[in-house]
Each structure stands twice: as C-alpha cells, then as structure tokens.
C-alpha cells in the first residue's frame, strides 16, 4: 500500500514539474516572438533612415 502511495506522489510531482516546464516554454516562446517583432521594427527603422540619407545625398 505504501508503494502505491509513493508512485502516486512521484506521478503528481512529475505532473507539476511538467506543467511548470510548459509554462516556462510558453513564456520563452512569447518573449522570442516579441523579440522578433522588435527586431523587425528596428530593421525597418534602419532601412528608412538609410533610404532617407541616400535620398538626401541624391538631392
């Protein structure tokens, strides 16, 4: 009987660890998406400023 209780506890422990791991992964993915979005915005700003400098030198 004690053996079964130990298995139940270890399964519950594994489940909590798995859910924590899942939460961490979701947060990591969300952060990566935000970083990708910010990098794209930065690239667009850099391209715009470069285009403006090229345009102003042509004038």
Image: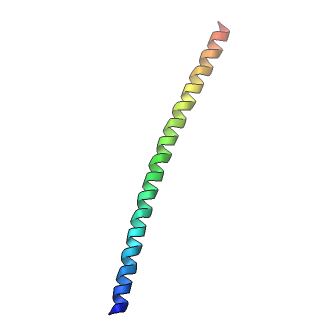
Q: Which corner quadrant of the image does residue 47 belong to?
A: top right
Residue 21 location, quadrant: bottom left
* Residue in view at x 41 percent, y 63 percent: 20
Above or below, 30 against 1 in this view is above
When the figure is inspected, residue 14 is found, relative to residue 32, above or below; the finding is below
Foreground residue among 7 and 47: 7
Q: Quadrant of the C terminus?
A: top right
Residue sticking out furthest to the right: 57
Q: How is the image coloured?
A: rainbow
Q: How many marks?
A: 0
In the image, residue 21 above or below residue 52? below
Residue occupying image coordinates x 47% and y 51%: 29
**The quadrant where residue 46 appears:** top right
| Left or right: residue 23 compared with residue 52 | left
Residue 56 is situated, as x and y percent measured from the top left of the image, at 63, 10
Identify the residue at horizontal 41%, vertical 58% (top origin). Answer: 23
| x then y, percent, for residue 49 | 59, 20
Q: Position of residue 43 (x, y in %)?
A: 57, 31
């Amino acid at each position: 009987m004690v053996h079964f209780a130990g298995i139940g506890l270890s399964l519950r422990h594994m489940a909590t660890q798995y859910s924590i791991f899942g939460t961490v992964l979701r947060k990591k993915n969300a952060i990566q998406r935000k970083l990708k979005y910010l990098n794209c915005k930065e690239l667009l700003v850099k391209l715009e400023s470069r285009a403006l400098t090229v345009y102003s030198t042509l004038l």
